[in-house]
Image: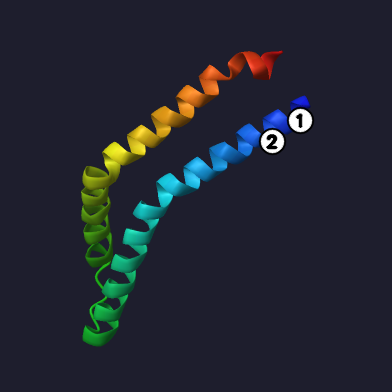
Amino acid sequence: MLPEDIYSSVGQQALITAVLMSVPLLGATLIVGILISIFQAVTSIQEMTLTFIPKILVVAAVLYFIGPWMGQMLVTFSEELLGNLPAYIG
């Protein structure tokens, strides 16, 4: 493989890993944000902490449950990257 192909492949794998790791957090935050927005529209309550605190709690809960999977995914990507390091250099 040409060096450009190797670098673009590593970059593509890094982007896919980053997207897969961020989707659970962003998805949960999006769902909570929509539910809070609907609640605020129905009740006419426009308190800023009402949107901020539940999102933080949901992110913490998702990290608690999905964190080990995210860590394993990052370790696997790092092992593959460092294992193929001689191919990237030479």
Instruction: Tell me which corner region of the image, top left, top right, bottom left or bottom right, holds residue 33.
Output: bottom left
Q: Secondary structure at mark 2?
A: helix
In percent of width and height, residue 13 lies at: 57, 38
Give the quadrant of the N terminus: top right
Residue at 76 percent of width and 30 percent of height: 4
Relative placement, left or right, of 47 versus 9 is: left
| Residue found at the far front of this picture | 1
In percent of width and height, residue 19 lies at: 49, 48
Residue at 43 percent of width and 30 percent of height: 76
Q: Residues within 10 Å of mark 2 (few under 14, many from 20)?
A: few
* Front residue of 8 and 55: 8
Residue at 36 percent of width and 53 percent of height: 24
Q: CA distance from mark 1 to mark 2?
A: 6 Å
What amino acid is found at the position of numbered circle 1 in the picture?
Answer: Glu
Relative placement, left or right, of 20 versus 71 is: right
Tally the marks.
Answer: 2
**Which residue is tagged 1?**
4
In percent of width and height, residue 21 lies at: 41, 45
What amino acid is found at the position of numbered circle 2 in the picture?
Answer: Ser
Give the quadrant of the C terminus: top right
Relative placement, left or right, of 59 versus 20 is: left
**Which residue is tagged 2?**
8
Image marks 1 and 2: residues in contact by CB distance under 8 Å: yes
Q: Secondary structure at mark 1?
A: helix
Q: Is residue 79 above or below residue 15?
A: above
In percent of width and height, residue 88 lies at: 66, 19
| Residue found at the far bottom of this picture | 42
* Front residue of 41 and 18: 18
Colouring style = rainbow
- Mark drawn on residue 17: none
* Front residue of 14 and 47: 14
